[in-house]
Each structure stands twice: as structure tokens, then as C-alpha cells.
Image (spheres, helix red, strand yellow):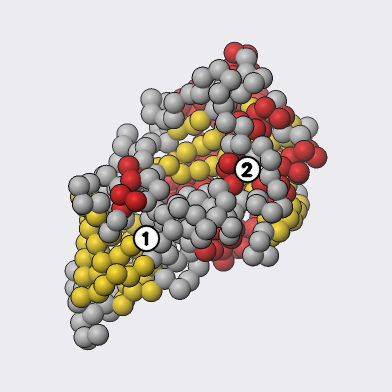
Amino acid sequence: MSQTDIAIDAAFDSGNIEIVSIDGATARLRIPKDRKSEFAQWFHFRVSGAVGHEVTLIFEDLKNTAYPEGWPSYRACVSEDRDFWGRADTEYDADGGTMTVRYTPASDMAYFAYFAPYSMERHHDLVAEAASAEGVTYRRLGETFDGRSIDCLEMGEGETQLWIYGRQHPGETQAEWWMEGALEVLTDPADVVGRALRAKCQIHVVPNCNPDGSARGHLRTNAEGVNLNREWAEPSAERSPEVLAIRNAMDESGVDFAMDVHGDEAIAAVFLAGYEGIPSWSDDFGERFYRYQRILDRRCPDFQTAKGYPKSKPGTANLTVSTNQVAERYGATAMTLEMPFKDNDDWPDEAQGWSPERCKLLARDCLAAMVEWFET
């Protein structure tokens, strides 16, 4: 290794990359698959020894990742202080299945990731701070394969059962940034949005449904390579203890309103998906979801309804998916919130694209829309 070669490592929380070769300030890389799984898309690593040099990172074999449509118009996230996450110059060659990222660090170290990481340390800080707030109860719902706690924060004096949960897919770190914003609102005695929801609801918040996958640097699965958002019809201790613990807690409380928070690789927009196609669907039942969607669309410029997933035809909903199962099982107004990995094309941000800051701000808009929904 010459003195001019950069160094790349990923032996840290949510780190994930495979080094093919390094030549000076140019590296060829591949994205490893989640353990026991075919899903590959999440990357997170550190480059050092590059001060004053343009680093060129060439990601190979992207045609064989989980969502190849996620790469066109995507720009890699980069940070030198692990606090502010910007975007690096990124080009994607669809024919060759390669992505080239170029960045010149001002300091001797730069971190690159698929989206701004949300570490397990930050998760523990988030849970501890929220649990210490007045009127908040901490509940350990269960344990993962790696021995991590499934954390739940509960608050509120109302009768309506509100469940908010996210990061079933650990690489969708947008979800926990959103959760941080939501918990700040819900635990702030000066925030009237939080006060109004606590007065109306019994609130259950699971900020990270998949801590094992988060720590391991997975895109979509838990420690055993299981996609948790396909386990909700028949969760088991052998495959999906996370879902089993959360669904058991939901069975105890019942669910009136539920939001499952995610990120989408391909669609450069914020959108909601509902529960069309479940056996108990009726127009009146569906209107409860559509009314919330209209309220959020009116209140939040970052939200839109033109782009999103196709609606399931009658009787064809996949009941292994959380939103469909929760709507069917509890008669709940349930929904999946999706945020982009890329940018919001309606309101692009050249410096950061979609960002942790925007995730947190969106959370307050979502909660304020819930206040209006419950009041009407």
C-alpha cells in the first residue's frame, strides 16, 4: 500500500461495504447482502487519508441489488463531522450497473452512507431522554435474536389507541429520524400538538422495530435474514420475535390509528400507502384513511398524493404486511408513511436532498394532521 492510498473501513455500528480494490484515491466497492438474505442496498463506511484529494468511489454490480431503480438520480450521503449530512457528486451508469461517487474532503476523514445513519447509541439516547420526560412510561416489549430490547414509549390520558412504529427495515433510517422529531413533539410540555394528542390518545411509540438489523448494517432484514414487514400474519419467536412482541402488545391494547414509518428507494417523494384490498374493506372504512391523507396534503408542502404505490384490487391485499394486517385485525385506520432516499422532487434541496432535518419536521406535520383528524 503506497502512502497515497486511502483507507476504507466499516467495522462500526451499521457499517457495511466490501472493498474490491484501492488505487490511490480511487476505490472499487461492492455492497454486501444482509445476512442470510438476498437484499443488498445499504452502505455505510469511512474513508481516511484523503485530505486535499478527490476521492473516487466506484460501486460495482448494482444491477443485482435489491432495488436497482433506486440508483438513477440518487446522490450518496456524505459527512465529515457525522452531524451534517450533505450529498456528494454521484453518477449512475445503468448499462454497466456502476455508480461513481466523487468527493474532495476538507479534512482527513469522510463518512459515506446510503442515507444519514441513525446509530444505536443515538437510539438509546432518544429512548432514555423520552422515557425520563414527565408522563412517559417505558416498556420493554421483548428481545431480539442478538439480545437487544424492543423499546416502546407510552404516554397520554385519552381512550383512543394510537400506535406509531418504524424502522422495520433497518436501512430506512429516515424512519428513526422521523421518530426523533415525533418524540420531541410528544414529550415537550410547551408543544400544543403533543399536548392535544396526549389528551385525546393513549400513544405507543416503537422508534426502532429492528435493532439487530440496524446495528448489523442491513437494508431490510433482522439478524436471521427475515423481512419483518412480511411477518405480520403469523409472527413467530423462531423467525420474527420483533413482530411477535409488537403485535402481542397491540392485541392487549387494541389499535384505533396506526402509522408505520418507512423509506422508499425509488420514488423521490413523500407519500402514504393504505389498506385497499383487505377483506373487511368498505368505502366508509377506507374514507378514514383518505381523510387523513387529504389533511396531511393540505397542511404539509413536502407531502403529495400524485406519486405512490398502486392500490391493491379488492380481496388481494397482502395480510403479511403490517398496515394491511393492523387494519384488518383491529379495524384500525392504518397507513405506511414513505420518505425518499433521494430527494423530494417537488421541493429539491441541492445541498442535502431529503435529510434528517426534513424527516423530523415532517413528523410534526404528521402529528398535527392527526390532531385535526381526531378532532373532526
Q: Is residue 188 shown left or right of residue 364?
A: right
Amino acid type for the residue under numbered disc 1: Ile
Seen at 32% across and 42% down, the residue is 69
Q: What is the residue that sits farthest to the right in this orientation? A: 252
Amino acid type of disc 2? Glu
| CA neighbours of label 1 inside 10 A, class few (<14), some (14 to 19), many (20+) | many
* SS class, disc 2: loop
Residue tagged 2: 231
Near-viewer residue (366 or 28): 28
Estimate the x, y position of residue 79 in percent, counting from the top left: 35, 64
- State the mark number for residue 31: 1
Residue 134 appears in the picture as rendered: no
The vertical placement of 355 against 112, above or below, is above
Q: Quadrant of the C terminus?
A: top right
Residue shown at 34%/57% (left/top)? 77
Q: How many marks?
A: 2
Q: Position of residue 94 (x, y in %)?
A: 22, 46
